Image: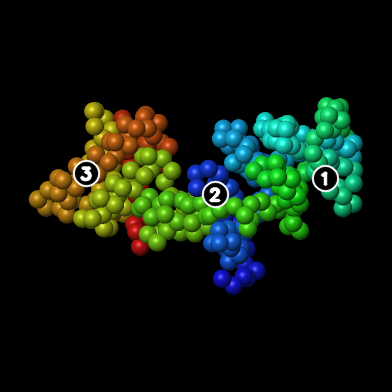
Amino acid sequence: MARTGETIETRVCIDDMLGPFDCQLNPNNRWNGWLSPSFTLDTTRQLSAQTIRMADEHGYDCVDTIHVFEGRADSQDTIHLIDSGMTHEVNDDGDREPTAIAVRIPWRSLDRGATATLTRITPAVRKAARKSKATGRGAARSVVVHVRWQWMSEESDTAANVVKPGQDGLYSIGGWEWTWHFASWWCVCGEGMDWHETECLCGMNRDANPKTPLGVATWAAADTLRRLAPEATSALVDLHGEFARIISVFAGDTEIDTADDTGPFDCETLGEADEILRAALAEEGPGAPGAAGWQLVPDVKTDQLYRVTFPAARK
């Protein structure tokens, strides 16, 4: 696929293991079909926390980890140890040593083009790291390190690297290497959309998409009623008693006849819509109507009468 300069804001993930994370990327620049995202520093911190948690749970030998070190522009140089908790053989006699790495950060020189350096850990380095402490009150600075633990024991010079921000201040992590793909949002109609595609084919906007069970149920009940009355825009629902019940349906300000023998509805359709709302109300509990935007209507016969405004009909 040809590359272009187009950059979009979206979200990416790796299956259900990493993400979703906000990012920027060029959707046309791909590695074997996978995406190459860039992240803000705050999002990089979130990514770091997830990778370290995965490594702790599943083992460092099968997980890359991202590390973010914080300091100040006038801090003294510091040494940080990244220890996997693993060991590897170092000679034919079976001697072993920890699989770990040291990060030396020259905070005062970063703004002049210096970078952190990565080295093996020795007893002297461990001793120096124990005494190392970030100081200073200058501007905040951060250093990001990517460690590929599965290659560390092979003395590979690409097993770990310092990730520098681009000119846009974003960090490209896992690009041309990890299987990043677009995160999805699921429309209430059941259609899955890439995150940056903000409008579903049915007309629902991503940000307006219902988030709660009762919000989803409101849409589903409206869809059910509109099978027989496409003009329906709202309903009155009575929650008094044991079961929720739709008592009126409206098209704008005009009430639609709900009588079984004279109006467009039949008992089965009204009952189906009632049951959809009942199930969601039972799942969420007493505060659900207000959270879903239902409006309490004063009534002399019941103190639980709500006007429910339906989402816009599908295109």
* 144 or 287, nearer to the observer: 144
For discs 1 and 2, the disc positioned in front in the rendered view = 1
Q: Is residue 280 above or below residue 315?
A: above
The amino acid pointed to by label 2 is Cys
Q: Position of residue 209 (x, y in %)?
A: 43, 49
Q: Mark 1 to mark 2: distance in Å? A: 28 Å
Q: Which mark identifies residue 208?
A: none
Q: Residue at x 33, y 37 (%)?
A: 280
- Of the 4 image quadrants, the one containing the N terminus is bottom right
Q: Residue 174 vs residue 155: left or right?
A: left
Residue depicted at x 77% and y 34%: 81
Is tag 3's residue or tag 1's residue first in the polypeptide sequence? 1
Label 3's element? helix
For label 2, the SS is: strand
Q: Position of residue 214 (x, y in %)?
A: 36, 39
Residue 31 occupies quadrant: bottom right
Q: Which residue is mark 2?
A: 13
Q: Quadrant of the C terminus?
A: bottom left
Closer to viewer: mark 2 or mark 3: 2
Q: From where the camera sits, is residue 186 visible?
A: yes
Q: CA distance from mark 2 to mark 3?
A: 37 Å
Query: The residue tagged with tag 1: helix, strand or loop?
Result: loop
Q: Label 1: which residue? A: 116
Q: Residue 103, percent across and down?
A: 80, 39
Residue that label 3 marks = 272
Color theme of the render: rainbow
Dot 3 crowding, Cα within 10 Å, few <14, some 14–19, many 20+: some
Query: Is mark 1 in CB contact (under 8 Å) with mark 2?
Result: no
